[in-house]
Image (spheres, rainbow, N blue to C red):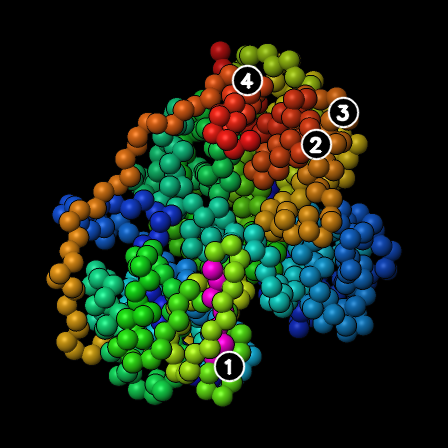
Amino acid sequence: MNLVVLMRMVPDVVEELEIAPDGKSLDQEALRLIVSESDDHALEEALLLKERYGGRVTVVAPEAPEVADVLYTAAAKGADRVIQLRGVEPGLGVAAMAEACAAALSAIPDLLPADLVLTGAQSIEDLDGLVAPLVAHRLGWPYLGVVTAVSEVSNGTATVIKEFQAGYRGEFQVSLPAVLGVQAAEKPPRYVPVAKVRAAMKATRIEEFEAPQPVPEPLQDVTIVALAKPEATGRAEMLEGSVEEVAGKLCELLAERGLL
Amino acid sequence: MNQAAPAVVTPTYDVTLENLFEHPEGRRVLTCIQCGMCAGTCPYGEVMDYPPRRIINMLRAGELEKVFRSDSLLSCVACYACMAKCPRGIRLTEVLLPLVKEQVFINLPETPAELQKALENTLRYGNPFGESSRKRAAWVKTAGVPIRILSEDPRPVDVLWFVECQNSYHPRGQDVSRATARLFHALGIDFAILGNEEKCAGECARLLGETGLFDTLMDYNMAVFAKYKFNRIVTSGVHAYDAFIYQYPERGFRYPVEQTTPFLARYLDKLRPMLTRKLPYVVTYHDSCCLGRHNGFYEEPRALLKAIPGVRLVEMVHNRVNSICCGGGGGGMWLDTYYKAKGHERLSERRVKEAIATGADVLAVSCPYEISRFEDALKVLGYDQKMVVRDVVELLAEAMEA
């Protein structure tokens, strides 16, 4: 199988997020970026598929600070080819970014045709989960999102599992090539010993690819008006007293609200 | 007490499984008489498929591959008990076990989730908790005494205090850091910390077999040390102490190093008159593996405790060289869930039962891992009303308050 994984760097919320003086964006200076968690799951699913069916995994990631570490780690885990996409700046907005990535996928030499493009179903910057469907739209391929497993690949189709509420599972069949928005891989993303990453840094070449021009403009009909930090409301009630007293009050509260 | 001389050891960082028998310390493995002292003294010996004695036997039979394919050695908490008891002086925990564990770790089909997270965090944030590296020195604001951070004030300093992860981030560890700072201050020590530039020394990653992570952290910390001028390092971490003494010299590390407890013991004469507050405690001291068995600092912490007015020191059944590991070493800190799933008894629980049996009301420790481990164990066993856990440094600071 020829598998392409699109991975993106997003703000790391372990660090404090600061709002820039314009009140509409995050302070880039204070940001530290980390690979989007569901993109990491997309990579894991691709690696599992490669182990099962053979083939190649190519990782494509827009340039960003620390993205090289992510690409070397992907190589150490088993990705065959890692590509950094130049000219797709952070702050482009989800729609333009997806558009630019899709254009790049078509233009990168020896990349398409592929069987699957996998990326995260959502990211902290894309709660609507637009990236995968927009990429699919641009490529003219079918799309399935919130995927939790690819259970079978045969005769030009893939059987894909989606998980719904209350443990319900849906099984879908999609013709290939297709774009998948991965919610979670079948197994948690694997650990790769740092020695292997250090070896990959020596043995792997990160290909640089300039995004096709013109890079799409951010959407003009939807604009950010303001960003705000969470406000402390002071509505929390601290239960005071001895352990017994606190436990008693807690039970009363829960009973009052019909939770006991 | 005089300045403790760093242990003189034959460096073994160039030893690999391939050249094991070309090195004197590796050849020593061949002298093993299969007496089983190592397996017998190992706190998890009875639950391991391959305790140390069998590993040596399999090495000699050319069957180490079987050990690499088993997760048996994840139960090794790197407590130095096997090494301390070996009648042939085979440096198991220092030489052979890390090499075997490295292969076990690389071959693990799946890394236990809790451990994976801790390792990924340590690589990314420099601490296993996944806390922001930018908040490593946040506790300093609550120290109550001025603490110089070298990145802000890079003038040369006498003591570089390497605080380490647990005492930078864990709330109880921060208590120890505040106490340490107050003591250094009272003793007039010229000290500074690296602040947010400091990262985990990496020793537990190495002891677990994650040598690449250890190398990365060692390279990083060595580069940071090179930025500043200081005479010596004092570290709160007992594993950091080991890393600096036994491993960092490979990268040219030549600073004198002491761990906080033995360091303070050298200042006992100056400290004693300051210990004016009577603490009416019955205290039992837990010898940490690194400080005790590995480096022989048995009397220093006890001398400090005895100097506190009112303290009565009692001993547990297993003390000094026979002390039982808290279970946190060699990656054990992040394998509690895994051990539980395997049905292993938690070593911290085994240990606090001994502490309770002494009738003491304070369990004194000097390794940063032990406070949280023993406090948890006391709660699990329902002894948290009977006993509290205090670092020796905390007790000293408490006795210093007027």
Instruction: Residue A238: say if magenta.
Output: no
Label 4, secondary structure: give it: helix
Q: Give the amino acid at mark 1.
A: Val
- The residue wearing badge 4 is A245
Q: How many numbered markers are drawn?
A: 4
Q: Is residue A252 left or right of residue B48?
A: left
Q: Is residue B169 left or right of residue A102?
A: right
Q: Is residue A138 left or right of residue B316?
A: left
Number of the front mark, 2 or 3: 2
Quadrant position of the N terminus of chain B in the picture: top right
Dominant SS of magenta comes to strand
Q: Residue A153 — which label?
A: 1
- Residue segment shown in magenta: A158-164
Chain letter of the residue beneath label 4 in the structure image: A
Quadrant housing residue A236: top left
Chain letter of the residue beneath label 3 in the structure image: B
Asked if disc 4 and disc 2 are in contact, CB closer than 8 Å, the reply is no
| Foreground of the two, B40 or B242 | B40
| Foreground of the two, B249 or B142 | B142
Are marks 3 and 1 in one subunit? no
Number of the front mark, 3 or 4: 4
